[in-house]
Image (tube, grey):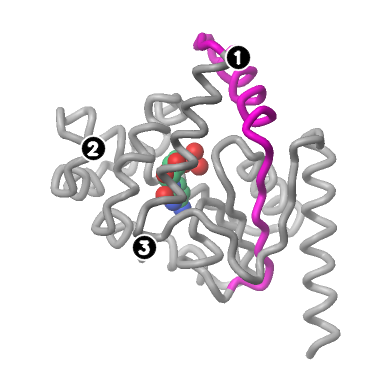
């Protein structure tokens, strides 16, 4: 079974995807990490994330980079959003993600275009979202834990800008797949959001069983 989890930054999709993977005993791929690694690699080499050739060259990042905690920073998130606009970058990362999705037994992938581009055949698709205010509040708490400091307004503005860039780009924009189930986590705790996600996937599996 392939489970596709898409949604904007700080919607809770990563936490939900990880929990779904544990619950259903499936491997999990955080595809945002691949784009973050590309963004970080561009910066390390003094390249320009808005330049397609520089960004494409950075898709050859060393595997070890994926374990670098620096990838979790806001700066890397911004760089990832910039490099992910280039269709050549998306194409270079496509096979790796498709192969992960197609492995025997299935997988859980989270990102922006899993249900629409990477695994349109996924048996269960969730589109996880939350209000900008709720996401800014979560991001602020996460940053505080990491010892980073930022004003609430700046975080909200950055989230809104990143949403706009992810949704407006021509290559695989962020959008809900027609057959994805919507999960709004604005008013939910992580445990409630996970429980809701498991219920939605269980419902989808049951419906497919009935349809067969
Ligand atoms: O999910 P995360 O915040 O780690 O993603 C960082 C950035 O990578 C996103 O803002 C988005 O621009 C890009 N991304 C993407 N497609 C994916 C996953 C992430 O374009 N499947």
Q: Does the segment drawn in magenta span residue 139?
A: yes
In this figure, which residue is indicated by the disc labeled 3? 94
- The spot of residue 146 in percent (x, y) is 54, 15
Residue 92 placement, left or right of 124 = left
Image region (quadrant) for ligand 1 = top left
Element type where label 3 sits in the image:
helix
Q: Residue at position x 84%, y 48% from top?
A: 195
How far apart are the alpha carbons under marks 1 and 2?
28 Å
> In the image, which residues are magenta?
122-151
Q: Which residue is more in the foreground, 110 or 78? A: 78
Within 10 Å of disc 2 (Cα), the crowding (few <14, some 14-19, many 20+) is: many
Tell me which label, 1 or 2, sits earlier in the chain: 2
Q: Are marks 3 and 2 in contact (CB under 8 Å)?
A: no
Q: What crowding class fits label 3: few (fewer than 14 Cα within 10 Å), some (14-19), or many (20 or more)?
A: few
Location of residue 24 (image quadrant): bottom right
Nearest the camera: 35 or 51?
A: 51
Is 16 left or right of 111, judged from the image as shown?
A: right
Image quarter of residue 144: top right
Quadrant of the drawing holding the N terminus: bottom right
Nearest the viewer among 28 and 196 is: 196
- Distance from the alpha carbon under mark 3 to that under mark 2: 19 Å
Percent from the top left, x then y, of residue 140?
60, 18
Residue 60 - label: none
Above or below 38: residue 123: below
Q: Is the CB of mark 3 within 8 Å of ligand 1? A: no
The image quadrant that residue 170 belongs to is bottom left
> Which residue does the numbered mark 2 point to in the structure image?
49
Mark drawn on residue 145? 1
């Amino acid at each position: 079974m392939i489970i596709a989890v898409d949604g904007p930054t700080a919607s809770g999709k990563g936490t939900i995807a990880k929990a779904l993977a544990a619950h259903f005993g499936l491997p999990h791929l955080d595809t945002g990490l691949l784009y973050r690694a590309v963004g970080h690699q561009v910066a390390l080499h003094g390249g320009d994330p808005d330049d397609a050739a520089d960004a494409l060259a950075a898709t050859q990042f060393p595997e070890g980079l994926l374990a670098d905690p620096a990838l979790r920073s806001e700066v890397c998130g911004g760089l990832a959003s910039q490099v992910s606009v280039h269709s050549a970058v998306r194409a270079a990362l496509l096979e790796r993600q498709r192969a992960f999705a197609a492995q025997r037994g299935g997988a859980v992938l989270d990102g922006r275009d899993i249900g629409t581009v990477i695994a349109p055949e996924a048996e269960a698709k969730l589109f996880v979202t939350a209000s900008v205010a709720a996401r800014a509040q979560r991001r602020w708490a996460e940053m505080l834990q990491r010892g980073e400091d930022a004003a609430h307004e700046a975080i909200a503005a950055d989230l809104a800008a990143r949403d706009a860039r992810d949704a407006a780009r021509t290559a695989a924009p962020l959008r809900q797949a027609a057959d994805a189930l919507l999960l709004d986590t604005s008013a939910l705790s992580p445990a409630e959001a996970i429980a809701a996600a498991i219920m939605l996937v269980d419902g989808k599996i049951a419906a497919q069983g009935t349809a067969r």
